[in-house]
Image (cartoon, grey):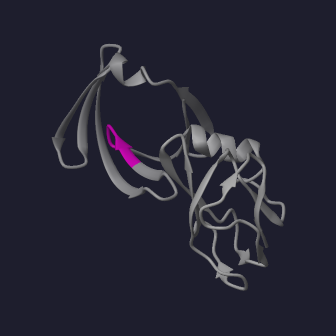
Amino acid sequence: MLKIVVNSQHTFELNENAAQDMDLMETHPGIFHILKDNHSYNVEVVKADYAEKTFAVKVNGQVYEVKAQDKFDLLLQRLGMGNGSNKQIKELKAPMPGLILDIKVTEGQSVQKGDPLIILEAMKMENIIKAPADGVVKLIKAKKGETVEKNQILLSF
């Protein structure tokens, strides 16, 4: 599942099969030709911020600001740790059970939104847990090599 927000106004949800319903061809680096429902679209990626999953794309000459959220972004949002959260975050909890592979911060360290905090291995995948907001790490409760449960407090701000 992929949630797409265009120009902060229109929201679309795409499933894994969405790409199968269109004919997509890259004509030049960052420039694509798409056929969908008997309509032709020329698409150019003008700007891409892969960390924030935001893009500026030009479709048939019109520029659109696009924000993508994958299933992990949506999970973090449901847990109250999404980018749209305006509340002050005091604790960071494990979004899923797993093994702490690495801790990228120290107590007393200032962090900015998006900074990597902890590497959590879950289902044989490494997940980088990033800072949900700017702040200072107050206390690290997790330890490298420790197995954690879902919603276990990893650190506090």
Q: Main secondary structure of the magenta part?
A: strand
Above or below 36: residue 46: below
Above or below 157: residue 128: above
| Residue 58 among those drawn in magenta | yes
| Residue 45 among those drawn in magenta | no
The mark total stands at 0
Looking at the rendered image, the quarter that the N terminus falls into is top right
Residue at the image position 73 percent from the left and 77 percent from the top: 137
Return the x and y of residue 105 as percentages of the image width and height: 62, 77
Which of 12 and 77 lies nearest the eye of the viewer? 77
Which of 145 and 95 lies nearest the eye of the viewer? 145
Return the x and y of residue 59 as percentages of the image width and height: 35, 39
The answer, for residue 83, to whether it is visible in the render is no
Q: Is residue 39 left or right of residue 114?
A: left
Looking at the rendering, the stretch of residues picked out in magenta corresponds to: 57-61
Residue at the image position 79 percent from the left and 73 percent from the top: 157
Residue at the image position 63 percent from the left and 74 percent from the top: 112
